[in-house]
Image (spheres, rainbow, N blue to C red):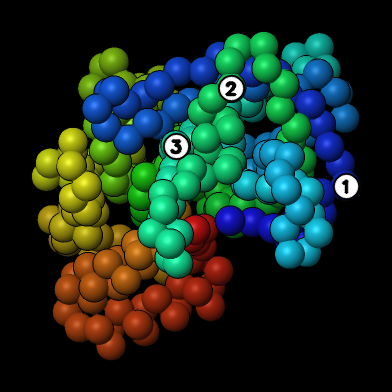
Amino acid sequence: MAHLADYNTENWYQATVKKTKRLTPADTDEIREIFLEVEQPEFECEVDQSFGVLVASPPDESGNNYHHRLYSVADIPKKKKGKTNLSLLVKRCFYVDEFNGEIYPGVGSNYLCDRKIGDEITITGPFDLPFKAPEDKTSNLILIGMGTGIAPFRAFIKHIYKNIKDWQGKIRLFYGARSGLELLYLNDKDGDLTNYYDQDTFEAIHALSPRPHWSDPIQLDKAIEQRAEEILEMLSFTNTHIFVAGYDKVNENLNKAFSQIMGSKEKWETRKAELIAGKKWAEVIY
């Protein structure tokens, strides 16, 4: 969770809910896509940014009266007649109090999931994400998203194929999601990204939980290992970038998977250090 003290939240804007739809079946985790419209013309938000949602709450230990949560832009923002339209993905979350064992609803996620068409919410920002399209169009991109961490990559990929165009490098999106979210990334003719990619350069590889209606871990690492030959080839190029977004545990599993692909933990640590030093590794972990 982001705290007010961590970000410049001086600029507040009012966003109206234009549409909200559930992406997942009723008997699974609730994940919604929410479409917002901001009428204030001074609000500017780009595809590689996030924005904050402010929810009034009892003062915390720092005296803040608002809960602040960041959300990535889930599609290319559209501006028309001074109004900005953007969307976000949100999962309705709950947490267990470590002292009394009680289950409590997450403040930001439940607030957003409960919003109806016409409701106004207060947003702030925008804030930059570390995912930037390389200037070199022959660059290879390995994109790894877990859960709603796939949201920024949806917008990012559309931006590359719709706005930058003529991309020559390979783009491989590995994403772990339970039933519903995968509909955003189908490779078939009805897929969400159909109009924006050429299969010679782009492919989305979906890692779904073995039992999507349960709480089994999503086997993202296994999906990556199954493409070991291709990933090893991509990592042999100096212009390959790796971008990661998702739960904090994803890094541990990814390090194991890449160590397996590279042949040893030491080889992967060396290659990862090269990526970081060359500013070709970026991550958003929450």
Residue 202: image location, x then y, percent? 33, 38
Mark 1 touches mark 3? (CB < 8 Å): no
Q: What's the residue at 12%, 41% (across, down)? A: 211
Q: Amino acid at mark 1?
A: Glu
Distance from label 3 to label 2 (Cα)?
12 Å
Q: Label 3 is placed on what type of residue?
A: Arg
**Of the numbered discs in the image, which one, if any, rests on residue 10?**
1
Secondary structure found at label 2: loop
Lateral position of residue 260 relative to residue 57, left or right: left
Q: Is residue 217 left or right of residue 210?
A: right
Figure check: 15 above or below 242: above
Q: Quadrant of residue 51?
A: top right
Using the image, determine if residue 163 lies above or below residue 22: below
Whether residue 72 is visible to the viewer of this picture, yes or no, is no
The residue located at (53%, 38%) in the rendering is 109
Distance from Cα at disc 1 to Cα at disc 3: 27 Å
Q: Position of residue 95 (x, y in %)?
A: 43, 52
Nearest to N terminus: mark 2 or mark 1? 1
Query: Which residue, given by chain and number where applicable, does mark 3 sit on?
Result: 92
Q: Position of residue 190 (x, y in %)?
A: 29, 15
Query: 10 Å neighbourhood of mark 3: few (<14), some, or many (≥20)?
Result: some
Q: Are marks 2 and 1 in contact (CB under 8 Å)?
A: no
